[in-house]
């Protein structure tokens, strides 16, 4: 079980939340597969499920008109409306609906994981965790009872055991067990969870305190803390290794069980200040941006390599284990391989910097064209020739296929066999198309 989510605040320490079982294989685990396609009515609540050959398998109503967002995880589809969330079990075609406070922030568990959603009211108050069991009976689990609770971020750990949220009112982290246990409150920003230990970071003045404490409380003797110069990024690897990058480029390494931290290899900032740090714990890497330079650091605190460029405006997910889109020093688009810190393929200049769709590992993507829709697909830095395509609608989570449109005709195209002319799926109209994770 592998996955992660990121919480990054402007001018604050960048951290990532991750949890993984001890028998996991590590970076490079299999990408999420898909076995169906959802055709979502953009005007009403209609839903059609197609099989992986494009044949209609079933159709139904979700009960959510004009869903504002949709999620696919582990064979389930979720449709979010203003005051209701509908969840579809794609295998059985069963639909369940849950009422939520109007305007709630609804967040899914990370990709490649069990299905879970959390809904938190926009003005604070009790949160709601929604997870289906083997019989698809929704468990609605309240974690807080505080009308003044104001969430600034909400995340679900990859195994859906905990919900982690930040409270803007009290500047603290709240960890809510999804089994109905009492929440844990801790000062600072959550870095991550390993086993049942919570790691947090709290900056005050020129220093950041990193703390490791058991979830659910415990004696002071159970809590370990250490202080570093103002942290800009913290990476927590699945085995408990911690890497902290401070604003002066110094690196501190330790583990959640070690007695004392160690000084790591300083990052060469080439005379620039750190602009941004993004942890990618699923790939056990951290990206440090200073001026026009990108440095990749591994989970031992060692610099893997550096390239000239900057991160694009594409929103980044810490679940990306391998590839990140970047802009070169000349303003062209390319991909950075996180494992090797090398560029993939030749840079391209005729696209915008915002990805319209990406595979789970970030290595297959389609970007908005210059002033228009996404029309091309890149894989491992190479542009794929899909012929006469006017718009790319979706990328499969494993990067094996894409849903494309020419005029009003929508097609399923293989990205592993470009000679395959594809399968007709229907008309574009007001429909949205999405791959359903297996």
Image (cartoon, rainbow, N blue to C red):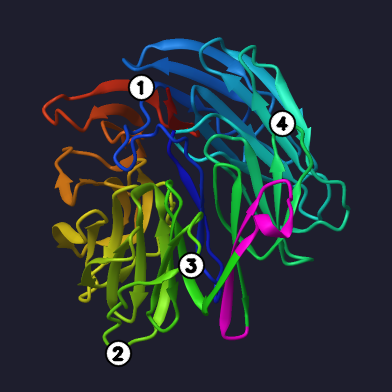
Residue at image position (52%, 17%) is 90
Mark 2 in CB contact with mark 3 (< 8 angstroms): no
Q: Which mark is residue 244?
A: none
The residue carrying mark 4 is 179
Spatial CA span between label 2 and label 1: 54 Å
Residue 276 visible (yes or no): yes
Crowd rating for badge 2 (residues with CA inside 10 Å; few <14, some 14–19, many 20+): few
Residue at image position (51%, 43%) is 19
Task: First in sequence, mark 3 or 4: give its number.
Answer: 4
Mark 3 in CB contact with mark 4 (< 8 angstroms): no
State the extent of the magenta-drawn residues as a range. 205-224
Spatial CA span between label 3 and label 1: 59 Å
Q: Which mark is residue 260?
A: 3
Q: Is residue 216 magenta?
A: yes
Task: First in sequence, mark 2 or 1: give its number.
Answer: 2
* Disc number lying in front (2 or 4): 4
């Amino acid at each position: 079980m592998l996955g992660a989510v990121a919480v990054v605040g402007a001018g604050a320490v960048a951290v990532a939340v991750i949890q993984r079982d001890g028998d996991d294989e590590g970076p490079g685990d299999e990408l999420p597969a898909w076995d169906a396609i959802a055709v979502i009515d953009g005007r009403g609540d209609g839903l059609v499920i197609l099989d992986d050959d494009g044949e209609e398998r079933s159709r139904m109503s979700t009960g959510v008109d004009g869903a504002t967002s949709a999620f696919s995880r582990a064979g389930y589809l979720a449709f979010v409306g203003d005051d209701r969330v509908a969840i579809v079990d794609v295998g059985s075609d069963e639909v369940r609906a849950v009422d939520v406070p109007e305007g709630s922030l609804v967040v899914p568990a990370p990709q490649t994981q069990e299905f879970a959603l959390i809904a938190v009211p926009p003005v604070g108050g009790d949160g709601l965790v929604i997870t289906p069991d083997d019989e698809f009976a929704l468990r609605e689990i309240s974690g807080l009872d505080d009308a003044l609770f104001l969430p600034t971020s909400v995340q679900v750990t990859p195994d859906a055991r905990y919900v982690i949220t930040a409270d803007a009112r009290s500047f603290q982290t709240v960890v809510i067990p999804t089994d109905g246990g009492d929440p844990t409150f801790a000062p600072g920003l959550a870095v991550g969870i390993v086993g049942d230990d919570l790691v947090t970071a709290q900056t005050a003045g020129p220093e950041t305190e990193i703390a490791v404490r058991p979830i659910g409380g415990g004696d002071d003797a159970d809590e370990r803390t250490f202080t570093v110069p103002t942290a800009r990024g913290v990476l927590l690897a699945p085995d408990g290794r911690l890497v902290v990058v401070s604003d002066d480029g110094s690196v501190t390494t330790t583990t959640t069980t070690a007695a004392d931290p160690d000084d790591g290899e300083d990052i060469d900032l080439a005379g620039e200040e750190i602009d941004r740090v993004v942890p990618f714990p699923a790939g056990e890497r951290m990206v440090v941006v200073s001026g026009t330079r990108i440095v990749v650091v591994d989970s031992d605190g060692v610099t893997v390599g550096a390239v000239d460029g900057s991160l694009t405006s594409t929103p980044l997910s810490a679940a990306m284990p391998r590839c990140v889109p970047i802009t070169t020093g000349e303003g062209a688009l390319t991909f950075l391989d996180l494992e090797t810190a090398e560029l993939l393929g030749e840079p391209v200049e005729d696209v915008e910097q915002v990805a319209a769709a990406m595979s789970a590992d970030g290595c297959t993507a389609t970007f908005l064209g210059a002033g228009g829709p996404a029309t091309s697909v890149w894989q491992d830095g190479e542009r794929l020739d899909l012929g006469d395509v006017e718009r790319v609608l979706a990328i499969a989570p494993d990067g094996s296929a894409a849903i494309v449109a020419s005029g009003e005709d929508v097609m399923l195209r293989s990205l592993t066999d470009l000679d395959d002319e594809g399968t007709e799926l229907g008309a574009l109209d007001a429909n949205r198309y999405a791959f359903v994770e297996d």
